[in-house]
Image (tube, rainbow, N blue to C red):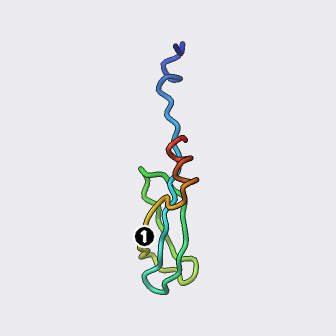
Amino acid sequence: MPSNMNEAATVRRFPTKLYCRCGNCGHTGTVSTYINTSPKLVCSKCGCRNPHVGGRDFLRGWANRRRGR
């Protein structure tokens, strides 16, 4: 049993990987972020600030690391 209460309350946080596509030019890319934050996404090709998030954690290895397996 941990002697310090902070040690017992420590939670490991893992980022999630979002797959995004630009609404203007169709440029695709990925971003690594935490679930509880909302990143300000900007297209690196045209500078558009209106991305479409297509999905997250498609890669099995990335998803397993996030789940702690």
Callout 1: 10 Å neighbours few (<14), some, many (20+)?
few
Could you tell me which residue is drawn at 47 percent across and 65 percent down?
40
- Identify the amino acid type marked 1: Gly
44 or 60, which is in the foreground? 60
Please state the horizontal and vertical placement of residue 30, each as a whole percent of the image: 54, 67
Q: Residue at x 41, y 50 (%)?
A: 36
Which of the two residues, 20 or 50, is positioned nearer the viewer here?
20
Coordinates of residue 54 in the picture (x, y in percent): 42, 70
Q: Which residue was labeled with disc 1?
A: 54
Check the image and report above or below for 12 versus 49.
above
Q: Quadrant of the C terminus?
A: top right
* Residue 63 percent coordinates (x, y): 52, 52
Q: Tag count in the figure? A: 1
Decide: is 8 above or below 66: above
The residue lying at 49 percent from left, 86 percent from top is 25
Where 60 falls versus 11 (above or below)?
A: below
Element type where label 1 sits in the image: strand
- Spot occupied by residue 56 in the image (x, y as percentages of width and height): 46, 61
